[in-house]
Amino acid sequence: MHPDVEQLTRIVPPPADRSPRAWPEIEARLGTALPEDFKDLVDTYGGGVFDETIWILEPDCPDRDYDLLAMKEERAEVLARLWEIGPEPRPSELDVPGAGLFPFAYIEGTGAYLYWLTGKDVRPEDWTVLANAGRGPEWEHHPMGSVRFVLSVLTGEVRSEILYDLPAEEHSFDSNEEILGD
């Protein structure tokens, strides 16, 4: 288990009876490899919401709003249209040739998303986090992996203007199965 996921399990117990995903098939459908920490996170917790705020997107979620594959396509289209019509500027981190965005989490009730900042010659293990306010032009770059970012925001080690409600006094995880009734 990835050390960041292991540390997260100490502050937020995962649901019982999780089963690993068929990552090679999922990555083939996505057209890219994914970071190991994220795959461990989904294998350990599944999709769902941490502290009623950070909703982890999972592959093949029955609700397309929380499905990793569906949101990859939708967010790319939404952002392309937004930047095409303006006036909202693209984050400067995307000025690097080959840089891109890939959503991995939705922020409950805000329209905000957490994205991996990807790169043509950047290994998935080295993808960092870009947070977008969703209902405004604010972007925050956090130079760490996705699970480290989630863990750091939950514990208060990292502060985010976009995730202003965190850290919570008590930590929780509600799985998609519980919430969506699968």
Image: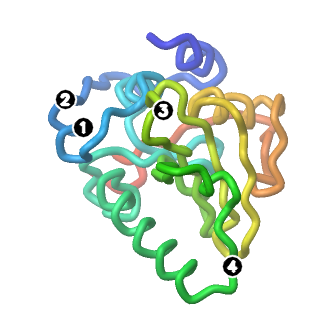
Mark 3, mark 2: which one is toward the viewer? 3
Left or right of 78 in this view: 169: right
Amino acid on which disc 1 is placed:
Glu
* Image quadrant in which you'd find residue 75: bottom left
Residue of label 2: 24
Tell me which numbered mark, 2 or 4, is placed earlier along the sequence.
Answer: 2
Estimate the spatial distance between the alpha carbons at disc 4 and disc 1, rounded to whole Å. 31 Å
Q: Earlier in the sequence, mark 3 or mark 1?
A: 1
The amino acid beneath tag 3 is Val
Q: Give the distance between the C-alpha atoms of the residues marked 1 and 2, in whole angstroms.
A: 5 Å
Kindly identify which numbered label has been placed on residue 27: 1
Which residue shows up at 58% across the image and 58% down it? 113
Task: Give the SS element for disc 1.
Answer: helix
- Relative to residue 99, is residue 44 drawn left or right? left
Q: Amino acid at mark 4?
A: Glu
Q: Which is closer to the viewer, label 3 or label 1?
A: 3
Where in the figure is residue 30, as x and y percent of width and height?
26, 47
Could you say whether the residue bearing mark 2 is in a helix, strand or loop?
helix
Which quarter of the image is occupied by the N terminus?
Answer: top left
Residue 122 has which mark?
3
Sort mark 2 into few (<14), some (14-19) or many (20+) by Cα contacts within 10 Å.
Answer: few
Residue ranking furthest to the bottom:
85
Is 1 situated above or below 169?
above
In this rendering, the answer to whether 84 lies above or below 144 is below
* Residue at (67% x, 29% y) in the render: 151
Q: Residues within 10 Å of mark 1 (few under 14, many from 20)?
A: some
- Please name the residue shown 57% across and 78% down the image: 83
Mark 4, residue position: 88
Residue 147, located in which quarter of the rendered image?
top right
Q: Earlier in the sequence, mark 4 or mark 1?
A: 1
- Marks 1 & 2, CB-CB < 8 Å contact: yes
